[in-house]
Every structure is written in structure tokens, then in C-alpha cells.
Amino acid sequence: MAALRYALLYSDESAEALYEDGVRLLLSPCGTEFVYETSEPRAHPLQTPHRSRHRTEFATSSCLDRVLQVLDFRNKFSGCPFIPLSILPPEKTVSHLSEISGVTWPRLEDNEFVGGLEGGGVKVSSLDGNANLYMSALKKEFLVEFLCQLSCKTPALNPESQSQDLLPHPLRYGERIPETGNKIPSSKGRSGSKYSSSVIQVMDDLRFAKHGFRYSWLVQRFSVSCCPAEFYYPMSVALRFLNRSSENEPRDGDTPTGSETTGEPENFREGAGSVLPKALPLTCRRTHLHRWNFCNPGMSSTFSMPLKVAVCGDVTYRFFFDGAGCVEIYPGDGSVFVSDGSCLGKYFKHQFLNEGTKLTEERTYMASDLPPDKPRAVYSVRALITQAVRFLEMSCKAKLSLNRLSDTCCWKPGVDTEHVGLPELLEQSFIPGKGRFAVYSDNVVLVNYLDGVTLHTVWNFAHFNKHEKGQVKGPINISPHLKNGFGWCQLNFPDGAAKVVQLESPGDYSSYIKAVIAWCVQIDDTARKRTVAPLGKENWSVEAELQKIQRFQFLVQNSTAVKCRDLSSVPVRSRRDENALREISCEMNIQSVLQKTSKAIQDIDLLLSSRK
């Protein structure tokens, strides 16, 4: 088998791999189908390669090794794996007499299950030994190794209930997995087709599974900045163990608990359980949602969807647009490059462990001004960051495209198979000399300039398009940590060319970028001013307040002090007369102020009635 040139995992968890001999393999999001593409060595570049579509569980020996390699890559970074029994080697399967649906993680003080590794990392094992978590000393990524039940056929259930049953549901802190002992679940009351690949033979008299349930050891990689809920507790235990080891804190009983020091939950002293991820079924009920990219693999800007993971040799690139909002690069030597926050793709922090001091060091690189390569360096920092920025630009271009099918996935719950809902137009305005500006319910901003240029971006509004609780009304797929929303925009020119530009570094396109930023800030500021604080429980009205002011004016006008208006003509002969005149002038000032307040309240009442 030829060497792997690159492997890509998209946001919908579909995979693509290209080999050195020109073979290209495309895997569906659920993993049940793949497209095998081959081309002759001396074929013309415009000649269409030979393509064949197959079921994954029926892969032949001609492409079996490549399918297993791409499937292992997908399962390593995917939320729900796909593990068919028919193509797995026998040594990779494990039989158990009882069903393993979850594990119980240990306490922080259990030295038998929580311990350090040679390189400064930590290992956290479950109490039953069915799951292990490994974290390096950098505390940026961790591996989870657990027993995962093999994929099986699904019964005739509703698609919504099927997808809900496939997704893992994590337990709460302190909640343990119910113990079933060594009892074997009865085969009655279950669908035979559902367990056809996990239960080999069932004896009806003894209700006993001869070979039990089939499992396989699965290894998955996760980032600490985007951890799934089912592994959050063991990840927190590993982080706290590393922090305690770095600070040389004693591990005796007098050590303060997590809630006393950092506000962490009390179950570090009790342990917690979590439900393990389940494998997807062998068949997909929504194969019509499988999309295949048949573009020329030599083209470098043909991503149909944003990237999630890219592997080129020993280097791994990870992109998080919806969660943490960061880019991570793992060169393979244990270090990591991270670009996050509002500087996504602009600055990269290189974090590595010093072999001498065993401490974490950090260096910052600017993507637009990278240093030259060192002569005897293991890898090129310039090449790594340049490739990451190129992947990021292509992912942003795919994310900013107007293709609404990128939000669908065949195995995720809540997918509308009939149609894809279009966003609703919320605000639209025409600025003379600029063009037409519009914003939609998913916070997508579209601008049509007068010179024919079109701009498309996503803006993170603070007040516009918000519920009363501060939540976005429409669906939005950006990270809340990114400043000004997505941080990138796409410019489409009249000649058909397109360019992805950073909002903070517009360059020659500053006139377009400044116009859209000013308009977004303006409508967000207008929405902030329109936001009225909720009134109290009392029945407040403008008319009642006006009546109170009128009563007060009547009392002031009919008072004896105000009636003496001709006192100003009397010659002032004593200190007493001067004080009296001051009191009269103060009363007249109060009257003028009350008249102005009454007029302002009438204007407010008129404005409120016109808006109703």
C-alpha cells in the first residue's frame, strides 16, 4: 500500500484521503459508505478517474487496508465511531458476557487508578479497567482508550428515536453507573437484527450468549479546549493531578479540596460515572444526504466544508470554529502551536516542554512575519504555520459560502430531511455611495456594493438579534470567544474571483471592511438604545405621572408666595427683603423646570403611542 499524502476530516465528520499513487478515498459522515477513486498513471489530467461506491462492511481485499486506515482516522477524531465487525481483524475484537455501557471514574486520591507517567503526563483508569485517559504534561490534548461495542444493525424505529438512542448521554457529577453484577441480559424482548453483529449465538433455554457482546479497543483524541461532556470529569482529574504535581503539593488528607481552592466540584473526593460513546449502526437511513466531492485533488481550494482535522505526514492540524474558536498544530514532537481568540490565524503560540528544567516554555510567532528556518531543525515552523493559515483560509471560504447544505449531517439528530430552512431577513438598509446592507437571523451579513463587489461575513452582535435572556434568536455557528464574530469575510468580485480577508487586517480592501464594520456597529448600538429595562410590578403610565405633575403645579401656582410677583418693583431696603425675593425666584425656577418636564413627558408619550 502506498504512503498516505494527507487525510482530511470535515465538520460533518466525512473523511477524505489521498495516497501517493493517486488513489483517493472518500468516506461518508456516518462511515457506512465510501467512494474509491483510482486513476491511471499516464492518464490525461482532464480524464475522469474511475470511481466506485461501496458499503464499508463489504469492502474487498483490494481496498481493505486503505478503508481500515481512513476509518481509524475518522474514529480517532469523531464523536460517534463506526466499527464494523466484518472487516476488523480477529485480534482487535474482545468478547464480554455483559454489556458495557458506561464506566465509573476514580477519585483524585486513588493512587491505584490515578498516577503519573515517565514523560510528566498522567494516566487515569476507570474502576473496572474498561477505559483509560492519558494526558501529556502540556495539558493541551488527551487520549481516551475504552471498550466500544461494535456497530450493529438497527431495528425498525423512528429516525428521531434512533438518533437519540445512538448519542451518548453523560451522567451528572457524582452519579455512578448502576451495577448489574455478572448477570447476562436476556435476549427476549430485544430485536434480533439489532444485536446480530454483537451476539453470535443465543441459547433460548439458558438465555445465555455464547460469545457475549463483541467490543474493540478504541482510541480517541480530544483537545482540552473542546472536551466532550462524557470525558469532562476524568479530564478535570488529570488536570488537577498535573497542577498538583507541578506545585509540589502534598497528597495527604490535609490537602484542601477542589471546592476550597479553585471552586471545583466536591466529587473529586467521590468519583463520577460517564456513559461511553456508542458506535453508529451498520446501515444509514439517510444515504441521500451523503455528499461526495469529485473535484480535482490537485486543486488546493476545493473544500466543500470547513475542516475539522487535517493530517499531513506526522503533523496534525485541528480547527475549532464552533466551540473554543482556536487552531492547534501538533508537529509530532510533543509540542503544540495554538492560535485562538480574536487573533485566530494571526498569532501562534508555540508551547513546548524544556527537557532540562521540565517546565513549559512559550514562544509567539506572527503569521505575516515568520522567522527563517533553522539548519538542523526537526521541522520548519514557517511551513507549519503557513500550511495552517492556508487550511484556515480555505475553511473560512467554505464556511462563508452560501451553501446551506453544509449544516446537515446524516446521523446527527434534528436533521430535516425534507428541506433545509433558510434564514430570515432581519434588517436591510441602503447607504448612498456605498450599497445595500442586509443581516439575517443567523447573524450572516451580506453587502452588495455599487461597484459590483459582494461581501459575506458573520458578525457577533451584542444586542441585535437577541432574546430577552441574551440568546441568539436564529441558529449561529460561530464561537462566542471570537471578537467581531467570525473574524473573516469573503469578497466576491464582478469577474468571478473570490478572496477571504481578515477583518482586522483588510489591507487593500479597507474601504469595504470599514463600511460593513461601521454598519454592524451602528445597528447593534441602535438595538442597545431600543432595549428598555423591564418595569416593576406596579402599573406605571405616563398619564398618571402627568396628573401628579399637574396637581403639583396647581399647588405651586395658587400658593401665596408665587402670587407676589410685583415685589420685584419694591425697592430693596433690608436684608430680609432680599431673602424674600430669592425665595420667590426659586419658586419661579421650579415652575419653569416642571413645565419643561411636563413637555418632555408628553413627547415621550407621543413617541410610545406612535410605536404601538
Image (cartoon, helix red, strand yellow):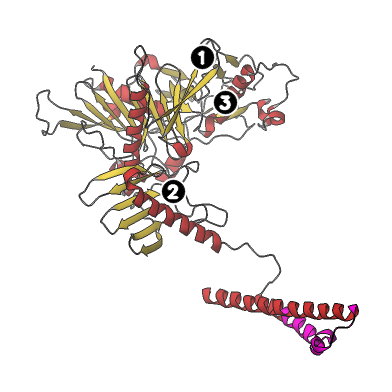
- Give the camera-side residue of 39 and 155: 39
N-terminal of the two: label 1 or label 3? Answer: 3
Residue matched to label 3:
234
Is residue 333 placed above or below 473 in the rendered structure? above
Q: Residue at x 66, y 16 (%)?
A: 248
- Give the camera-side residue of 151 and 496: 496
Element at badge 2? loop
Residue matched to label 2:
476
The quarter in which the N terminus is drawn is top left
N-terminal of the two: label 2 or label 3? Answer: 3
Q: Residue at x 42, y 41 (%)?
A: 162
Q: What distance separates the C-alpha of mark 1 from that of mark 3?
A: 26 Å
The kind of residue on which mark 2 rests is Ile
Picture quadrant of residue 32? top left
Element at badge 1? loop
Q: Which region shows up in magenta?
A: 549-575
Residue matched to label 1:
354
The kind of residue on which mark 1 rests is Asn
Q: What distance separates the C-alpha of mark 1 from that of mark 2?
A: 41 Å
Is residue 460 placed above or below 366 in the rendered structure? below
**Looking at the image, is mark 2 or mark 3 nearer the viewer?**
2
